[in-house]
Image (cartoon, grey):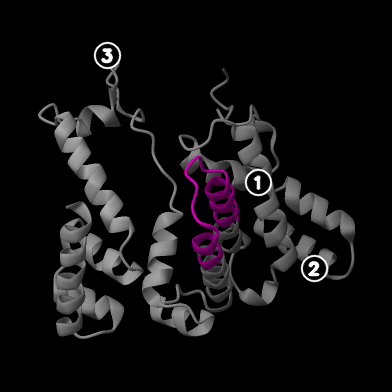
Amino acid sequence: MSKHKVEITGINTANLKVLKTDEMIELFKRLKNGDKSAKKELSEGNLKLVLSTLKNFTNRCDNMDDLFQVGCIGLMKAIDNFDLKFNVKFSTYAVPMIIGEVKRYLRDNSIIRVSRSLKDIAYKTLKLKEQIFMETGKEPSIEELSKKLGFDEVDILCALDATKSTISVFEPIYNDGGETIYLFDQIENKSESSNNWNDKLLLQNAISKLKTKEQFILIQRFIMGMTQMEISDELGISQAQVSRIEKNAINNVKKLVK
């Protein structure tokens, strides 16, 4: 393999044209004036940007050719919506759109199925986040997204968390030329017995039956290690309310696992 060839999609980046800033500006001016050929030149002149962005996803998709096509869709959307008045480099504007398109593809094609309602909340949230970022250059807060969408903040957080990409336990994390170390090697606990796993399954099943806010608080308290005060700030409620919800959730779990 040539040292100039990118490992994904089989495209040799040495043969790809990279547009200079002044060339890019001129092409966008032509595109705005109705020159359709300018769009083709802009897309071909930014394929290297797509390939560069996809390097962050090489371990999360079996078919990088498909992912390249998805990245190109993000590129075309960026070209269609970019305006020289934004006063930013095209790459600064395009990369988040390419990443967003790729993440949506990976999320929708995940082997783990997420409920339609969660997907709907996550889709609307991500779409609004992207819109606000493109307009203001800043990431909106969960509180701001909640007000604009009309969804509870906890529902938004849970939806975004549920649609995150998964990582295989057989993901290679280290190789010094000898034996490869996989993620599974780092998380394996030989002291675990079948009884431990059974207890965990019962606990997970019980937690899944709790209300969304109860689930969120238990996860943040006992898995993420947050304090009640930190959770109260996150949710915009009092520490006393967090304490009551937590206590009620624990009592409900105890009843469900008996």
| For residue 210, side relative to residue 129 (left or right) | left
Q: Give the Cα distance between marks 1 and 2.
A: 26 Å
Give the percent coordinates (x, y) of residue 47. 67, 44
Give the percent coordinates (x, y) of residue 156. 43, 70
| For residue 12, side relative to residue 32 (left or right) | left
Q: 105 or 215: nearer the eye?
A: 215
Residue tagged by mark 2? 29
Instruction: Provide the residue span drawn in magenta.
Output: 98-121
Q: Cβ–Cβ below 8 Å for labels 1 and 2?
A: no
Q: Judging from the image, what secondary structure is the residue with disc 3 in?
A: loop
Whichever of labels 1 and 2 marks the residue nearer the N terminus, that label is 2
- Do we see residue 22 in this rendering? no
In the rendered image, the residue lying farthest to the top is: 178
Above or below, 102 relative to 183: below
Residue tagged by mark 3? 178
The quarter of the displayed image where residue 33 is located: bottom right
The residue shown at (88%, 58%) is 36
Q: Judging from the image, what secondary structure is the residue with disc 2 in?
A: helix
The residue shown at (67%, 77%) is 85
Q: Quadrant of the N terminus?
A: top right
The residue shown at (22%, 74%) is 231
